[in-house]
Image (cartoon, rainbow, N blue to C red):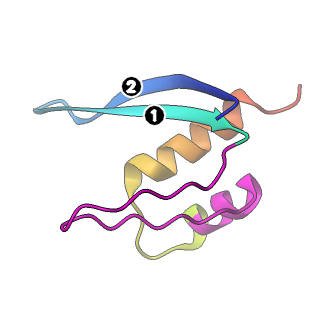
Amino acid sequence: AHSFSLQQTVYSAESINIAHHIFVASQLELSPLPSDADELIEVHALPIEEALDRVLHSSHMHVISGFAILAYMRSHQKK
């Protein structure tokens, strides 16, 4: 990655102490490593606007990922 930085840390619920660290990276290169036996990682490259559209129109969503997309768009909107 050309740049890699922590965007923010969020928690799913006040009663569950699990931190979700949200990072932003740019100019990534696809360089897959062998996966672990119990690991499934799928890369989906798409414009941020399409990612937002999927968040807003999907019947199933990973909430932390949806929040990360919304937070990124808000912090990078043109003023």
Q: Badge 2: few (under 14), some or many (20 or more) residues near its Cα, within 10 Å?
A: few
Disc nearer the start of the sequence (1/2) = 2
Q: Position of residue 76 (x, y in %)?
A: 75, 31
- Tag 1–tag 2 contact (CB < 8 Å): yes
Foreground residue, 10 or 21?
A: 21
Rendered-image quadrant of the N terminus: top right
| Residue furthest to the bottom | 59
Magenta stretch: includes residue 25: no
Above or below, comparing residue 29 to residue 52 in the picture: above
Mark 2 sits on what residue? 9
Foreground residue, 29 or 7?
A: 29
Query: On the picture, is 51 further left or further right than 17?
Result: right
- The quadrant holding residue 60 is bottom left
- The quadrant holding residue 54 is bottom right
Foreground residue, 39 or 62?
A: 39
Q: Position of residue 51 (x, y in %)?
A: 65, 60
Query: On the picture, is 24 further left or further right than 49?
Result: left
Q: Judging from the image, what secondary structure is the residue with disc 1 in?
A: strand
| Residue furthest to the right | 79
Residue at 60%, 43% in the rendered image: 70
Given the image, on which type of amino acid does mark 1 rest?
A: Ile
Q: Judging from the image, what secondary structure is the residue with disc 2 in?
A: strand
Mark 1 sits on what residue? 22
Residue at 73%, 40% in the rendered image: 27
Above or below, comparing residue 3 to residue 52 in the picture: above
Foreground residue, 11 or 5?
A: 5
The magenta segment is: 28-54
